[in-house]
Amino acid sequence: MEQLQQPELWSSDAETYRRILDDAPGLICTFLPDSTLTYVNEAYCKYFDLTPEELLGGPFLDFLPDEATRQAAMVEYSSLTPERPVATYEHAVSAPDGSIRWQRWTDRAFFDDQGDISYFHAIGEDITESKATEEQIRQMQKLDSIGRLAGGIAHDFNNIIMVMQGYLSQITAEAAGFPEKFNEALEELDRATERAAGLTRQLLMFSRKQVMHLGCINVSATIENISKMFDRILGEDIDLELECDTDGPSVRADAGQIEQVLMNLVVNARDAMPDGGRLTIGTVPVEIGKGVRYRNPEARPGRFVCISVSDTGVGIPADALEHLFEPFYTTKRQGEGTGLGLPTVYGIIKQHDGWVEVDSRVGAGTTFRFYLPVDEKDAAGPQDRRVDFSKLPNGQGKVLFAEDDEAVRKVIVTALKRYGYTVLGTDSAAKALKDWRERSGEIDLLLTDIVMPGGVSGTRLAKELLERNPSLKVILMSGYNPDPEFGEWMKDNEIAFLEKPFVPARLIETLRESLSG
């Protein structure tokens, strides 16, 4: 068999090898045990914006940003042995523009006859972007974990607030003959519970468990509608500019929650401009194509509306940016912020299937951008969900009631009986099923919490009872909505929903509406 001739490309010509190395996209160098560079390829020179003459003979370790990193690298190099001659590691380097970038290197040590290291051959690549993406993913995972914790805490707080509001309602109803100072105390207690309820709503928004009232809205129109409120918040020394595309597409969103996002960002912008400045709020349609690399890992292909809020304020330090959306983290002075404003923004936008981006530099202002998916449906006007509780006559009927929190159960049972209803109260869905089997013919309405112990949820209880009696009236209640298909199922079955915490009067009004059809 004829032997193949070795191609000229792979001859022993050193210049040929040098050309191959110079054409390689990766960073390639050789250096001595004391880190003196003996060879660098063209990619290496371009990366550090230096010529071979400026690099060769200099220490490779000079590009590492601090002494600790240099010492760690030396330890890594000296640990290589003939049995383990190759090491792969990552470290930061000082780029020509002054920034810190990340590289991944694979180094091979070459040894002399005595087993000592003669020199190193190293191949490197810039991994700054992938490191940033990894960090964003870790941050999102951390925020998701905190969100689940926040949702659980808010659920328990809602029950406590409900008990407080329930008994306050009972006391207030009998307070006509109380001295004035007692009435003032009751009013203060009522305001305090409302503030507490507001905090739990913020926690639920951050955890993306808040029940939303979705409609097709034009965000630009929403911004213009509340721009006068922005003027009052900002004051005379801050100029407000609106750059909104009023003819742009609509999004499917809860208008009230989007207003809250904007209000939170406007308040933060005002605080960042104590000496005055300019705040610009804008909207623009954005289309992301398939295969497009976007800087945020949460981005995806599709049509979106980008809402931007830009200020000319003091900016945010780089070390604070990664913590902005963590609950209770704030860059404001003590007593000036709760640390829930931006986590609430993050939670609301995530719940709307969007994402948030931040650009900021100290002394150069801050821009928040959030992206919401486009909805092609016609915009619907906001719905007025307020209820007049001034007059609530007694009703009648038998209610099967399931709630695992004893204090909440007690206050609701008291309210139902006070307004003339008969109640079968129980602490689990399983016991409610037992009561149904024994007295189904007497029951007019099922009232149940969604999250229940014992493996049977309130939703499952309702579905089972509706299968047995499709005409049964049902009211579900919860501090948050754990089921993404919850809203559609409720709508299809004409089921009412009460969002915790609620006052007894709200319960009675909803119950009367359900029973009256």
Image (tube, rainbow, N blue to C red):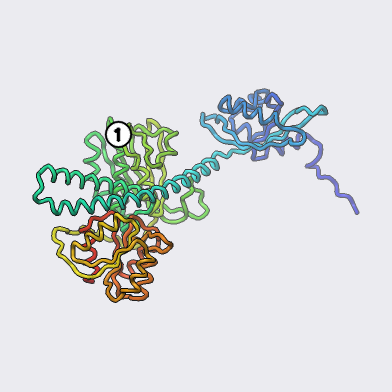
315 or 9, which lies in front? 315
Question: What secondary structure is marked by label 1?
Answer: loop
The amino acid pointed to by label 1 is Gly
Q: Is residue 3 above or below residue 512?
A: above
Please indicate whether residue 252 sits to the left or right of residue 101 in the image: left
Q: Is residue 479 above or below residue 510?
A: above
**Residue 2 screen position, x and y as percent:** 90, 52
**Residue 45 screen position, x and y as percent:** 62, 31
Q: Which residue occupies 38% across, 60% down?
A: 452
Q: Which residue occupies 34% across, 66% down?
A: 490
Res. 285 in view: no
Q: Which residue occupies 68% across, 23% down?
A: 57
Tell me the quarter of the picture where residue 216 sits: bottom left
**Residue 211 screen position, x and y as percent:** 33, 56
The quarter in which the C terminus is drawn is bottom left
Tell me the quarter of the picture where residue 12 sits: top right
Q: Which residue occupies 25% across, 50% down?
A: 164
245 or 379, which lies in front? 379
**Residue 231 screen position, x and y as percent:** 23, 41
Q: Is residue 271 above or below residue 370?
A: above
296 or 21, which lies in front? 296
Which residue is denoted by mark 1 in the rendering? 335
Q: Is residue 494 above or below residue 278?
A: below
